[in-house]
Amino acid sequence: MESRLRLLLLMALATALATALSGCSLFGRDRAPVPESSGSAPVISPEVERRVIKEPRIDTEDFELGLYYGLISVEDFGSNPIYGARIDYHVTEGLFLQGTYARSGKVGRSSEEVLNPPIDLLNGDRTYSYYDLAVGWNLLPGEVFIGRKHAFNSALYVLAGAGNTSFGGEDLFTLTFGAGYRVLATDSIALHLDVRDHLFNNDVTGEDKTTHNIEFNLGASWFF
């Protein structure tokens, strides 16, 4: 009798325990899972102001046609105004070819002519002109800034070439070396500042020597 009573008590206790465990499981399903914390929220949210940048629309044409005006110091004959034209062909972003023609008015008188007025070393032909073909290279492409909101593309370049100079009634083979600075003012117009040295042998003063004729000029060009 006691063994049956114990058996019944054990069965009742097992049933009650199973019911309690089942209720806990069902009760837990009604709650949403607690999300795991990935870290504390930032105290300050950064706000970055985006600048609107306008990219230059540079023309992709390879030819450049320009005019210029300046001064040339003809050795032994003083400084004289000079004006000319040039055309460039840009082979690459760095390399370009340039053809130039320029002409000066009547050059000044040499010191010997001033001291001896009847003497005319140039026999009345005092015009000075030249043409040449040069190879140029853009050394330092960059930008020039005017104020805080305006930037212009620019380049420092060097060049070397050869051609002919007409002076004193003679045609003289000439070597040309120079450097310049180019600023792209608009999408197709550039401004130039150039300095050049024109070297040729000259004997108009009675001495055969290599003369250095330094030229400074300002110009503008158009890409097409």
Image: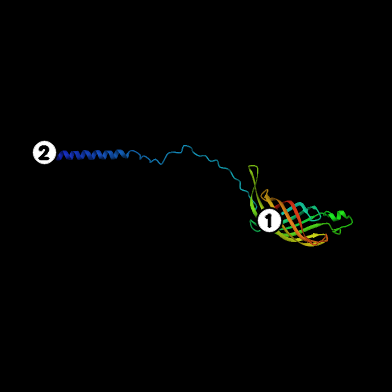
Residue at 25%, 40% (x, y): give it: 21
Q: Position of residue 220 (x, y in %)?
A: 72, 51
The type of residue carrying mark 1 is Val
Q: Is residue 23 left or right of residue 119?
A: left
Mark 2 vs mark 1, CA separation in Å: 119 Å
User: Which mark is drawn over residue 158?
Assistant: 1
Label 1 near label 2: C-beta < 8 Å? no
120 or 48, which is in the foreground? 120
Q: Quadrant of residue 89?
A: bottom right
Sort mark 2 into few (<14), some (14-19) or many (20+) by Cα contacts within 10 Å. few
Q: Is residue 38 left or right of residue 224?
A: left
Where the N terminus falls, by quadrant?
A: top left
The residue sitting at the right extreme is 118
Where the C terminus falls, by quadrant?
A: bottom right
189 or 27, which is in the foreground? 189
Query: Which scheme is used to colour this image of the protein?
Result: rainbow
Which marked residue is nearer to the observer: mark 2 or mark 1?
1
Q: Position of residue 92 (x, y in %)?
A: 64, 58
